[in-house]
């Protein structure tokens, strides 16, 4: 065995550090908190609220860490795929699961299944409520008299 053996050969794997040090996957929580602060603080204008609402909604839709839950063919596993997924609209890293949720939303006969999946567990419920809240926040920004 040579002295230039790769690190993974010995069971040690070095993970690549992200540019933002872990904030890269959780930036939507920060925008959600800033959105709440913008509503509380009257100095923030409608443009700030609208921008933060759109950013939080985008995070909930395509990047929030949730479980995939795509149907699998394994006996005894009724709750579906357990891989980490990306947002409420996308599936996990598997090709078959990637666009499954978005297709469910677009097909009328599967829309009910998609709707029940939004509240499948606590994690999905929190992300769904954050997305709905940020959407309503953006809509209310356009209503005269209700905006900041």
Image: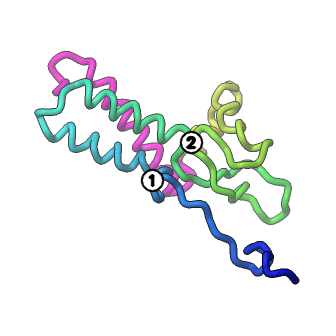
Q: Where is residue 48 in the image (x, y as percent from the top left)?
A: 26, 30
Residue 95 sits in quarter: top right
Residue under the point 18% across and 27% down: 45
Instruction: Name the residue nearer the viewer: 96 or 75.
Output: 96
Residue under the point 55% across and 60% down: 17
Residue under the point 50% across and 55% down: 123
Q: What element carries label 1?
A: loop
Q: Main secondary structure of the magenta part?
A: helix
Q: Where is residue 10 in the image (x, y as percent from the top left)?
A: 77, 81
Q: What element carries label 2?
A: loop
Q: Quadrant of the N terminus?
A: bottom right
Q: Which residue lies furthest to the left in this view?
A: 42
Which tag is nearer the camera, tag 1 or tag 2? Answer: 1
In reply to whether residue 92 is colored magenta, the answer given is no
Residue 39 sits in quarter: top left
Q: Give the range drawn in magenta.
A: 119-148
Q: Is residue 95 left or right of residue 59?
A: right
Q: Residue furthest bottom?
A: 1
Q: In this view, does 49 lie to the left or right of 105?
A: left
Residue 4 sits in quarter: bottom right
Q: Is residue 106 left or right of residue 10?
A: left
Q: Are marks 1 and 2 in contact (CB under 8 Å)?
A: no
Q: Distance between the residues labelled 1 and 2?
A: 23 Å
Q: Which residue lies furthest to the top in this view?
A: 144
Instruction: Name the residue nearer the viewer: 111 or 29.
Output: 29
Mark 1 surroundings: few (<14), some (14-19) or many (≥20) residues within 10 A: few
The residue beneath circle 2 is 88
How many circles with numbers are drawn on the protein? 2
Q: Where is residue 72 in the image (x, y as percent from the top left)?
A: 80, 53
Q: In which quarter of the image is the C terminus?
A: top left
The residue beneath circle 1 is 20
């Amino acid at each position: 065995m040579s002295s230039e053996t790769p690190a993974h050969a010995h069971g040690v794997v070095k993970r690549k550090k992200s540019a933002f040090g872990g904030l890269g996957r959780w930036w939507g929580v920060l925008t959600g908190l800033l959105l709440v602060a913008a509503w509380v603080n009257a100095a923030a204008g409608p443009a700030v609220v609208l921008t933060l609402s759109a950013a939080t909604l985008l995070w909930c839709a395509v990047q929030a860490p949730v479980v995939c839950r795509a149907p699998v063919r394994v006996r005894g596993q009724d709750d579906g795929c357990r891989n980490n997924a990306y947002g409420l609209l996308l599936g996990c890293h598997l090709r078959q699961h990637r666009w499954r949720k978005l297709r469910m939303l677009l097909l009328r006969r599967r829309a009910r299944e998609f709707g029940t999946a939004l509240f499948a567990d606590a994690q999905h419920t929190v992300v769904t409520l954050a997305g709905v809240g940020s959407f309503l926040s953006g809509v209310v920004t356009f209503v005269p008299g209700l905006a900041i």
